[in-house]
Image: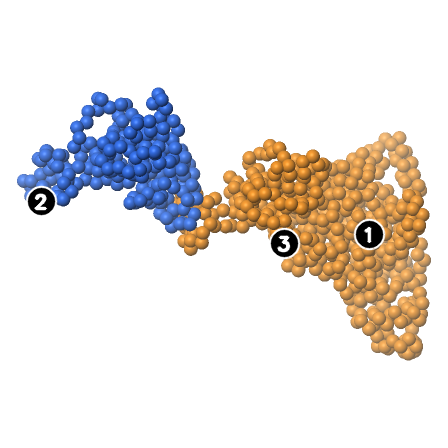
C-alpha cells in the first residue's frame, strides 16, 4: 500500500480515493487508499494527466477486494462459534489484514477538460484525452456540482454505451440516478431529457432502453 | 422571409413529401398530439417563400416494430412513457401544400415547388389568414364577403364573390348541417355587394320572409326583410280561384303570383318529371311525337281526348297506344296542380326575367304546395325562359360590344338540385346545360343539395366553388370531390367536420381549401349586412323613422321600383 500524505497534495485532489495501478486510454484500474472504501458504482471520478494540464473524467464501473497476492485467496477467519470474532471483529482481531488485502476499482474514461495557464478549468470535452492517466496518480471522486456540470450535456452517453467489459445498462442507470439525485427537484426533468437522448442512441434497441430506464427509477 | 412567429405555434419540421402527394411533417410541438386538429391552416417558412397548406391528417408512428410487440402498459413506469414520446413514438402530420407567397409579392400563387427538408411548419396566425383570404369589404360592389371563421381563431375567412359568380357553385351537406343558412349567408353577401341578380327557387319558403331556426327558439330573417325592395318575392298560386280551400292563404304580400299555362310546358319538362310522374321511357318519348303533331297546346289537346281519339292519334303518329294513354293518365297530375291553367300568357314569367335583368333579386315561393312535382316544373320552365332570353341578350351584346347591352349576371339557386341534374336527365334539362356552358351566357347555378352522388359527374366537375358541410356517405364524399385535384387529404377533413356550423370551403372563389365555422346568421349579422344601406335597410322599422325620413324613403323606394 503506498504511503500518501495529503498535506503535500494540491487542492484538486482533496477528495482523492485511490491511485491508478493499471492504465489505458479508454479506462484504468485504481487501488483505494483505504481497504473496502472505493468510490460508489457509477460515481464520477477524475484524475490529472501527466503534465497536469488536463483532467480526465470517468465513471466507476467495477470494484473488488482481494488478496495482494493474486495467487492466494483469503481464508476464513471468523467462525460460527461464539468464541471467535465475526464480521468487523475479524479486522480488529487481525490488524495485519489491511496490509494483506486490497480494494481495486475500474473506471471507464468518458471525457476530459483542459486547464488554462492559471490552472483554471475550461469547459468539458466529451473526447478521450491525448494520453492515458499516468500510473500512481491519484483518483478523486467528483463533488455534486461537478457531476451536474459533467452530465449537463448528454454526449457522454454514447461512449458509456460502448464501454467494453463494463455492465453497460447497470452503469448507465447508476450514473443517471446519481445525476438526477444531485439535481434535486429538477432531477426528473433532466432524467426525461437525458432519457430521450439515450433513446435516440438506442433507436434500434427498445428492450435495452427500457431496461435502463426502469433501473433509473429505483 | 422574416419570421417572428410565436414559438407556441410551431408544429414541426418537414421530413419528406412531394408536390403531388403532399408533405410529411414530423410533429415537434410541445403540445400533446391530442391537441392538434386536422383541418388547420398552416404556414411553412422558407427562405424567401412562405407556403400555405392545410393539415389533412395525423398519423401515429414508431421508429421500431419492437415497441409495438411489447408496448408500455399500465405497469410501465411513467419515465419510460415520457421518454418514448417524441423519440420512439411520434406523430406525423400530413400537410396539403396549396399556395406560395414569394417575397415582394402581394398575393399568394398556387404552388409549383416544395419547401426543402426540415423547414419549420407553423400553425397559421391571423396575419396569414389576412394574406390569403383578405378582409371583408361590404361596400356596394365590394366582392370580399366573410363567410366564417377558422376553427380556433377569431378572424374572417372571406369569399371572393366576383369569382364566385363566375362559375356554377355548390352547397352540399347532410340534412340539418346548415346548408340553407350557408346559402342564405352567401345570397345576403351577393345582394349586399350587388354582384349579380339572384333567382332563388325557394322550395321550403325559407329565403323570402324567414324561417324558424333549428334547435333554437329563434327566427331567422329571410332576405326580403333584410334588403327590402331589392328583393322581390313571387309565389306560385296555391289555390285555384273560387275553390274553397282547406287553408286560407297564409303568405304575406308578394310581388306577384305565378301561373303556368299548359301551353308553356315542353316535352323536355315532362322528361325531367319522368320519375315524379312515374312515366316509362316509351311513354315519355311518345310525348315528342304528340308535340310534333299537336303543336303548342299538345297537353291540353291530349287531356281532352277520349280513348277513340287516343287510338287514332297513336295510329297517325306511330306511337304505342298504351304509352300514349299512360302519358295521358300521368299528365292529369300536372293539370291538377293549383297553379296550372289550360292556357296562359308568358307575361309574368317574362316579368321575372326582366326584373332579374334590371338587377332585382327574385325569390320564387311555392307556398303550401311544396310538392316536388310543382317545384320542378316551375323551376324548369322559368329557367328555360331565362336561358332563352339570356342567350339572345348575350348574342346581341357580342354583336354590338356595347357596354349598355352587357347582360346582368344571374345566379340561380336551386334546392334538391340532384332531381334536376341526375345523370339520366342532366344531358337534356336546362339546368344541365347551364351548369355545363351557361357561364358564357352570364347565368350560373348555385346548387344546394344533400345527395351530391346523384348529380351527374360531368356537372359536378364543372362546379367552381364548393361549400361542403358534413357528409358521411362514401359515395357522396367521392362525388363532392369530383374534379378536385389532391382531394384524398380533404376527404379525411370532410368526414371529421362537426355536424353543425362547420364547413369546408374549396374551389374557384377560395384561394385554398379551408375549414370554417359558419358565420352566425343572427341579429349581429343583420346589422352588419344592412349597415349603411339607407333606405334599403329595414332593420329600422317604419315607425321609428321621422316624418322626413319616411318621405325620403318613399321617394327612394319609388325611384327604385320605377327606375
Which of the 4 quarters of the picture holds residue B220?
A: top right
Disc 3 secondary structure class: helix
Left or right? Give the position of B31 relative to A153: right
The C terminus of chain A, quarter of image: top left
Same subunit, tags 1 and 3: yes
Disc 2 secondary structure class: loop
Label 1 close to label 3 by CB (< 8 Å): no
Is B398 or B214 nearer to us in this picture? B398
Q: Mark 1 or mark 2: which is in front?
A: 1
- Dot 1, how many residues are within 10 Å of its Cα: few (below 14), some (14-19), or many (20+)? some
Disc 1 secondary structure class: helix
Colour assignment, chain B: orange
Q: Residue B117, position in %: x, y?
A: 56, 43
Q: Residue at x 90, y 61 (%)?
A: B264
- Dot 2, how many residues are within 10 Å of its Cα: few (below 14), some (14-19), or many (20+)? few
Q: Which chain carries label 3?
A: B
Q: Can residue B520 be seen in this view?
A: no
Q: Mark 1 lies on which chain?
A: B
Alpha-carbon distance for marks 1 and 2? 109 Å
Residue under label 3: B488
Residue furthest to the left in view is A83
Q: Which residue is drawn at 57% across and 40% down?
A: B120
Query: Which label was assigned to residue B439?
Result: 1
Colour assignment, chain A: blue
Q: N-terminal of the two: label 1 or label 3?
A: 1
Vertical order, B23 against A188 (above or below): below
Q: Residue B140, position in %: x, y?
A: 82, 37
Which of the 4 quarters of the picture holds residue B186?
A: top right
Same subunit, tags 1 and 2: no
Alpha-carbon distance for marks 2 and 3? 81 Å
Is B178 or B153 nearer to us in this picture? B153
Residue under label 2: A80
Amino acid at each position: 500500500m503506498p504511503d500518501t500524505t495529503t498535506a503535500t497534495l494540491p487542492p484538486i485532489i482533496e477528495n482523492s480515493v485511490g491511485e491508478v495501478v493499471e492504465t489505458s486510454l479508454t479506462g484504468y484500474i485504481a487501488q483505494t487508499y483505504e481497504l473496502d472504501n472505493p468510490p460508489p458504482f457509477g460515481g464520477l471520478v477524475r484524475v490529472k494527466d501527466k503534465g497536469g494540464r488536463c483532467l480526465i473524467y470517468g465513471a466507476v464501473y467495477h470494484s473488488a477486494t482481494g488478496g495482494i497476492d493474486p495467487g492466494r485467496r483469503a481464508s476464513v477467519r471468523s467462525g460460527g462459534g461464539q468464541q471467535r470474532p465475526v464480521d468487523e471483529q475479524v479486522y480488529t482481531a487481525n490488524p495485519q489484514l489491511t496490509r494483506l488485502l486490497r480494494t481495486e476499482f475500474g473506471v471507464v474514461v468518458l471525457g476530459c477538460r483542459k486547464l488554462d495557464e492559471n490552472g483554471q478549468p475550461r469547459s468539458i470535452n466529451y473526447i478521450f484525452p491525448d494520453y492515458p492517466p499516468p500510473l500512481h496518480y491519484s483518483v478523486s471522486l467528483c463533488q455534486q456540482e461537478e457531476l451536474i456540470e459533467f452530465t449537463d450535456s448528454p454526449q457522454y452517453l454514447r461512449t458509456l454505451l460502448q464501454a467494453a467489459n463494463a455492465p453497460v445498462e447497470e452503469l448507465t442507470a447508476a450514473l443517471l440516478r446519481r445525476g438526477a439525485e444531485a439535481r434535486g427537484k429538477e432531477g426528473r426533468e433532466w432524467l426525461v431529457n437525458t432519457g430521450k437522448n439515450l433513446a435516440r442512441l438506442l433507436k434500434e434497441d427498445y428492450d435495452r432502453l427500457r431496461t435502463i430506464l426502469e433501473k433509473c427509477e429505483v | 422571409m422574416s419570421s417572428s412567429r410565436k414559438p407556441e405555434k410551431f408544429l414541426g419540421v418537414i421530413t419528406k413529401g412531394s408536390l403531388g402527394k403532399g408533405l410529411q411533417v414530423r410533429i415537434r410541438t410541445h403540445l400533446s398530439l391530442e391537441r392538434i386538429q386536422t383541418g388547420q391552416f398552416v404556414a411553412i417558412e422558407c427562405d424567401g417563400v412562405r407556403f400555405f397548406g392545410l393539415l389533412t391528417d395525423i398519423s401515429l408512428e414508431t421508429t421500431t416494430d419492437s415497441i409495438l410487440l411489447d408496448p408500455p402498459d399500465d405497469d410501465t413506469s411513467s419515465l419510460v412513457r415520457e421518454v418514448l414520446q417524441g423519440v420512439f413514438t411520434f406523430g406525423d402530420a400530413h400537410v396539403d401544400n396549396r399556395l406560395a407567397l414569394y417575397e415582394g409579392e402581394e398575393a399568394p400563387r398556387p404552388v409549383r415547388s416544395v419547401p426543402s427538408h426540415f423547414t419549420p411548419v407553423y400553425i397559421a396566425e391571423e396575419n396569414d389568414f389576412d394574406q390569403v383570404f383578405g378582409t371583408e369589404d361590404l361596400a356596394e360592389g365590394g366582392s370580399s364577403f366573410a363567410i366564417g371563421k377558422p376553427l380556433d381563431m377569431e378572424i374572417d375567412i372571406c369569399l371572393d364573390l366576383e369569382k364566385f359568380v363566375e362559375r356554377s357553385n355548390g352547397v352540399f351537406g347532410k340534412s340539418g348541417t346548415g346548408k340553407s343558412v350557408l346559402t342564405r349567408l352567401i345570397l345576403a353577401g351577393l345582394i349586399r355587394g350587388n354582384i349579380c341578380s339572384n333567382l332563388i327557387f325557394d322550395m321550403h319558403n325559407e329565403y323570402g320572409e324567414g324561417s324558424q331556426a333549428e334547435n333554437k327558439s329563434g327566427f331567422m330573417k329571410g332576405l326580403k326583410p333584410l334588403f327590402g325592395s331589392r328583393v322581390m318575392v313571387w309565389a306560385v298560386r296555391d289555390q285555384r280561384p273560387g275553390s274553397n280551400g282547406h287553408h286560407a292563404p297564409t303568405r304575406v304580400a308578394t310581388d306577384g303570383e305565378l301561373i303556368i299555362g299548359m301551353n308553356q310546358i315542353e316535352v323536355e319538362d315532362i322528361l325531367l318529371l319522368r320519375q315524379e310522374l312515374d312515366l316509362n321511357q316509351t311513354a315519355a318519348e311518345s310525348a315528342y311525337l304528340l308535340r310534333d303533331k299537336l303543336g303548342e297546346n299538345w297537353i291540353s289537346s291530349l287531356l281532352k281526348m277520349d280513348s277513340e281519339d287516343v287510338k287514332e292519334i297513336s295510329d297517325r303518329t306511330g306511337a304505342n297506344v298504351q304509352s300514349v294513354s299512360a302519358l295521358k293518365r300521368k299528365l292529369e297530375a300536372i293539370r291538377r296542380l293549383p297553379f296550372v291553367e289550360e292556357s296562359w300568357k308568358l307575361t309574368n314569367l317574362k316579368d321575372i326575367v326582366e326584373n332579374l335583368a334590371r338587377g332585382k333579386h327574385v325569390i320564387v315561393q311555392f307556398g303550401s304546395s311544396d310538392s316536388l312535382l310543382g317545384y320542378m316544373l316551375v323551376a324548369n320552365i322559368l329557367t328555360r325562359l331565362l336561358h332563352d332570353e339570356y342567350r339572345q341578350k348575350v348574342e346581341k351584346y357580342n354583336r354590338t360590344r356595347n357596354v349598355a347591352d352587357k347582360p346582368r349576371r344571374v345566379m340561380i339557386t336551386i334546392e334538391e338540385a340532384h332531381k334536376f341534374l341526375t345523370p339520366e336527365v342532366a344531358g337534356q334539362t336546362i339546368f344541365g346545360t347551364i351548369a355545363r356552358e351557361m357561364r358564357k351566357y352570364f347565368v350560373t347555378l348555385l346548387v344546394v343539395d344533400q345527395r351530391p352522388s346523384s348529380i351527374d359527374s360531368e356537372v359536378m366537375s364543372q362546379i367552381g366553388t364548393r361549400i361542403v358541410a358534413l357528409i358521411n356517405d362514401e359515395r357522396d364524399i367521392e362525388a363532392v370531390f369530383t374534379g378536385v385535384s389532391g382531394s384524398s387529404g380533404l376527404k379525411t377533413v370532410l368526414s371529421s367536420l362537426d355536424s353543425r356550423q362547420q364547413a369546408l370551403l374549396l374551389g374557384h372563389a377560395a384561394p385554398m381549401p379551408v375549414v370554417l365555422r359558419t358565420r352566425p346568421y343572427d341579429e349581429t349579422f343583420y346589422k352588419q349586412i344592412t349597415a349603411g344601406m339607407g333606405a334599403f335597410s329595414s332593420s329600422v322599422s317604419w315607425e321609428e323613422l321621422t316624418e322626413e325620413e319616411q318621405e325620403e324613403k318613399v321617394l327612394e323606394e319609388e325611384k327604385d321600383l320605377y327606375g
